[in-house]
Image: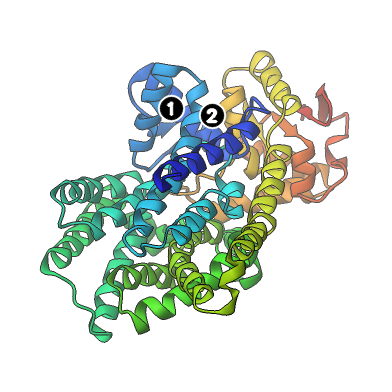
Amino acid sequence: MNKNKIVILIFLLTLIFRLYFVFTTPHFADDNAYYNMRQIDNILENNKPIFEDDLSYSGKEQLFSPIFYYFMSVFVFIFGDIALKVVPEILISSLVIIVYLIIKSITNDDKAILFSSFIAGFIPILITNTLNNISVYSLALPLTFLTLLAFIRLENKRYLNLFVILSVLLPLVHPIAFILSLSFILYLLISKSEDVKIINLNKEAIFFFVFVTLFIEFLIYRNAFLTQGFNTVWQNIPDKILDRYFININLGKILLGLGIMPLLFALIGVYFGIFRQRNNVMVLFSSMLLSILLILSFKLINFEIGVLFLAITVTILSSVGFEKFFKYIEITKMANIKNYIMMFLFLIVVLTLVLPAYVNAKNVIKNGFNDDEFNALKWIKENTEQDAVIFSSVDEGNFVTTVSNRKNVMDENFLLVKNINEKYNDVEEFFTTTSIAKSVNIMSKYNSDYVYISDRTKKIYNREGFSNLEDKTCFRESYNGNGEKIYKRRC
């Protein structure tokens, strides 16, 4: 069968795999998905996103580029809410095709191309962080590697035009474009040191991309930099949870997220691509690999998001490793059993990537929001005052606000929030203290009259129950569902 048709089949297999899990639940896996849903709904209703949010933190300015929300709203307008489930999965699955097109520029070995393309569809960490989620990364990831594809084919006028368009679009979608800017700069430096020639057109394209990225990101986030300085890089995340977002490089977690086989063959590919063949494209993706590792080392990006980009880069680099391995087999006595070796190698891919991807997918659905949580928040929407403020965990803030249409005390949109550490400490103390007086004082401080508790809340704070809320003098249990409780403050 033609390898183009096989890659289309891999793309369809990846998409069907993802959609199978997505449609086992009507809800989403991530709290931020509900914030994004609210932005999309507001565009459909009012033709603009929410920049002045009356519900988040009981009122705050939101700072972001709205391109992703407008993009998604077009599909929701045409196809309805089902687009929220399907479109992100199609976008992520398209990485199979993009990776395939990139690898064709690196190697002519069909087996290596197909192996790496298949791996791109079933990277475990890609499943964990993008399945059943309305995430901007479902667009930013494909655009990043599509930009790289256009860059390595700049001599073709169509790809040159595509690169120019993506150079403006990617920074507008997400500041992750900075990773690509750093990669291009490292590419220039490594190429110079290894005497790898870069044509002038590519150099001009790099300077153009870096300049446009800096200009656009400064325009979007200038207010944040002016008010919060360099802390904007860390998104104004509270000190107590910085380590949860920006952890040190952990080889064990990287191996679990990427799979040991792609990483092993990627290292082989880097060795041959840079030091033996001086392959221009391999130098580019090795620079991408290095830039991600540097950004992770300096804790300038969420660890799991960094590993997402690392995983796709490693998959591309592994293609040369596979090529060398297959060529080695051909010149040894093992050539007679090469088909069995291929089958064994594919079995390893299934056991170390596809099987973990399946397990991760099941866990994503299992740990996602459920009907009981949704029903509790519907009760809030129907039975509380329009201006009510709901006290919940930070991790559930966006979910609470979107479903109940009520104000929250705190959510994960930390940027531009004043006294962020004080607010986070107050929320944490409320859910960990046994003092009724402290609980009442904290709720009064934020003008909150209702508390939302779920099994998820108990897991977050590692508690079996909240004795401070059982005091009937100051708190009344207004709702008791299947693990979800809502309390009304009375004093």
Q: Is residue 43 left or right of residue 208?
A: right
Q: Observer-nearest residue: 471 or 46?
A: 46
Q: Observer-nearest residue: 192 or 168?
A: 192
Disc ID at residue 40: 1
The reply to whether the C-beta atoms of the residues labelled 1 and 2 are less than 8 Å apart is: no
Residue occupying the point 80% across, 43% down? 458
Q: Position of residue 242 (x, y in %)?
A: 57, 61
Disc ID at residue 448: none
Q: From the viewer's perspective, is the residue at label 1 or at label 2 nearer?
A: 2
Q: How many marks?
A: 2
Q: Observer-nearest residue: 410 or 13?
A: 13
Rendered position, 69 above or below 131:
above
The image quadrant of residue 272 is bottom left
Q: Position of residue 247 (x, y in %)?
A: 58, 66
Q: Amino acid at mark 1?
A: Ile
Report the Cα–Cα distance between label 1 and label 2: 13 Å
Instruction: Say whether residue 59 is visible.
Output: no
Which residue is disc 2 drawn over? 85
Q: Is residue 489 left or right of residue 103?
A: right
